[in-house]
Image (tube, rainbow, N blue to C red):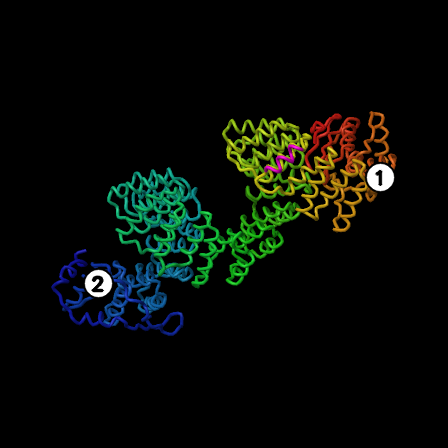
Amino acid sequence: MLLFRTPYNRLAEVKFKQASIFLRHPQILFETQNTYHLHGIAYDPQIPIGDHQSQLGHNAHQLFDEMSESNVVTYNHLLFEYSRSNKNVEALNLFFEMHRLGLVNNGSSLSCALKVSGVSNNRIVGKQLHCHCIKSGLGVDVSVGTSLVDMHMKFDNVKDGKRVFDEMEVKNVVTWTSLLSGYVQHGSVEQALEVFTRMGKEGIRPNPFTYAAVFGALSDYDMIVKGSQVHAEVIKSGFEYFNPVANSLINMYAKSGMVREARDIFAIMESKDVVSWNGMIAGLVTNGLDKEALELFQQMRCEGIQLTRLIFATVIKACASIKESSFTRQLQCRVIKSGYDFDLNIRTALMVAYSKCGDMDGSFKMFKTMQQSQNVISWTAMISGYLQNGGKEKAAHIFLDMNRMGIRPNDFTYSAILTAHSCVSPYQIHALVVKTRYMSSPNVGTSLLDAYIKTGNVVEAAKVFENISQKDIVAWSAMLAGYAQVGDTEGAINVFRQLSEEGNYPNEYTFSSVINSCAAPEAAVEQGKQLHAFSIKYAYNNYLCVSSALVTMYSKKGNIDSASKLFKRQGKRDLVSWNSMISGYAQHGYAHKALEVFDEMQRENIGMDGITFVGVISACTHAGLSEEGQKYFDEMVKEHHVYPSMEHYACMVDLYSRAGMLEKAMNFITQMPFPAGATVWRSLLGACHVRRNAEVGKVAAENLISIEPKDSSAYVLLSNIYAATGDWKERAKVRKLMDHRKVKKEAGYSWIEVKNRTYSFLAGDRSHSLSDSIYSKLEELSTRLKDAGYCPDTTYVLHDVEDEHKEAILSQHSERLAIAFGLIATPPGTPIQIVKNLRVCGDCHAVIKIISKIEDRDITVRDSNRFHHFRGGLCSCGDFW
């Protein structure tokens, strides 16, 4: 130590003016033979001269100018001083002068120069220095070899760094740590851990910086179990109180969500540095403990710890998360006082904080102050801010301005602006995405297909999905949700199968989407059950979104008992669960059970929405509870402040109409605050058909036809009303109008699923391979039905034919064919479930009740209005539908 310090103490007395020649001529070339058989490479003169913020480096430079005699030690002192002060250009130029003067005769100078090259990322000089190491023979020096390893690793040149390491005969703990840190920096965690393991096998005791590097690797790759083991080793080594180690431990535990462990380490640190405080506060913010982070920040200020750019950015982020606008303004003042107000990251953080606090004016003002330094990040943050605060149009204008300014959007920009699909065209954004080559980005692709799905264009969404090169689980789930939205069960099942075949693992949202697709009327019942089994296998069945989807699926597929069991087993319920159960009971005819669920919902103070009351009023409708339905409608408006939509008015009209109060229904329509839609008039027309009220029916039909002139149901229902009342002349006029407008009547189909295969039937259908057996079963049933007291109600045959022919027509309705097939194709006692696209007629309803009794079968019929559960000669609708 004395030999090292003595010349330094005499620096002020020694004045070597000739040494200042180097400082006035800094661009010195340095050539040497390259051991890789390349030509000599000159020192890059384009390196910008470093800053002069370090007063220490400046003083050393001034003393060096006044020296009158030079030697290796004095040069090395200044070289090390430049290196410590981050004066990288000056340090390299000084080294080149030393080389010219022949003063580079030991490894310390060369080691320092190698370090500077690595820090400044000067690869050209680094290669020259490596060549010089080999030529001079100084490469065998352990400090030089270590610096070479470190330099190559900083250049991301892992291969050369490892080769230098392997060629070193003597290695110390710093050498091993340099290699390990390089692997960590390069993301090669497995190799880093192998190096750490080898150190132990070869008897190299890690130092604190070794452990710090290992913890850094383990935190970035979520290997907390291994991290805990290494932590135990650190405690045994006595290094847990060293700041680099403790800081890395805090970072590792915080990133792994183990905040308590991170806090414990922070609490026992004897001398916390600024990195310790920053790491602990950042860890709290990462884990959503924003208030605790702000409290720790206040404590940091009270203890006089220097506030850095990083800590300001972190604390501002915490303010944004909890929408703390007043403290954000205080932080902005403190940032200005600290001289960091021109820092781009801090300005962007402030802009984001103001937007998350709902202060878009403050956010935009901050954005305007960044005119000279606006980049794609700040533009994207501004767009996202407006979108988060409901300003889709302003976000679209910002996006246009961004493009006019020549700022190229990135994947986050496109992902954000695509959520403003009502103000921007997905097709135009799609064209820009293709032009800027972001089509293969998973984020952009997922946002684009989601935008197409929300506009109902699933075909285009599927094309986008196929073009995503690396589909993540979000993309898969979004595509499944799109198919579920349009009721394309087959498309959803195919995507789910493709997901599994490509080795991807579904998550809870994937299961939720594909199960929702199985709730479509055309979906096979068994598909939903199989997916339920898959969700159990993957342990996702108890996730809220999955269990809610299962409740919805089972209730829509006719299995209300399974839906009820799942609903009762839910530990936590969301609004979807409650609404599904209420609507399910309503659709299945269990009105009182639906109202019981609603009462339970009120007792638990669950927030309600419009869908809740659609289910409640529908339950009252199907049970004929007109007064209760009116009460719930008034309660919705006055107590829950839910503004009635067209669907609510349609439910109320349906409620009055089914109860026979057609005049009240008409009055209700005239008092609506907006023109009645097709669903309202269709509900009234359907009731007029049941009540055979031609006068009101004609008004309803005319209004419905004016809204939807191509809807066949309006013409058919009106003609049926005329037929039921015997007005064949008016019926003929309606049919002629249909022909003139080329409106085709929707054929009545019935479906039944047997052994995982779906069979469909038309009225009078004889296309089935078992047609003879089906009609034979119908003849058998006809005899048994008459013996049970059945008398055909021919008023449901709306044709001007003989009664005998009418009875034959009734006996061949599609639902009867489907049931007859179910009876002969399934074992005795097996429940039968059919689906019909139109409303089941009254005569068939009476027949199915008797069949359920004489065949001892549970029969479920899902028509266009609701579910009918037939058992023992009774129906769940109570003959009111």
Given the current orientation, which residue lies at the most extreme left position?
13
User: Is 633 inside the magenta-drawn segment?
Assistant: no
Find residue 563 and report its image quarter: top right
Please state which amino acid type lies under the numbered disc 2.
Answer: Leu
Residue identified by numbered label 1 = 800
Name the residue that disc number 2 marks: 78
x%, y% of residue 555?
A: 64, 34
* Near-viewer residue (838 or 768): 838
**Quadrant in which the C terminus is drawn:** top right
Work out which quarter of the rendered image holds the N terminus and state it: bottom left
Number of marks present in the image shown: 2
Relative to 91, 441 lies left or right: right
On the image, the x and y values in percent for residue 861 come to 72, 34
Q: Which residues are magenta?
A: 663-671
Residue at image x 18%, y 61%?
Answer: 59
Residue 665 inside the magenta-drawn segment: yes
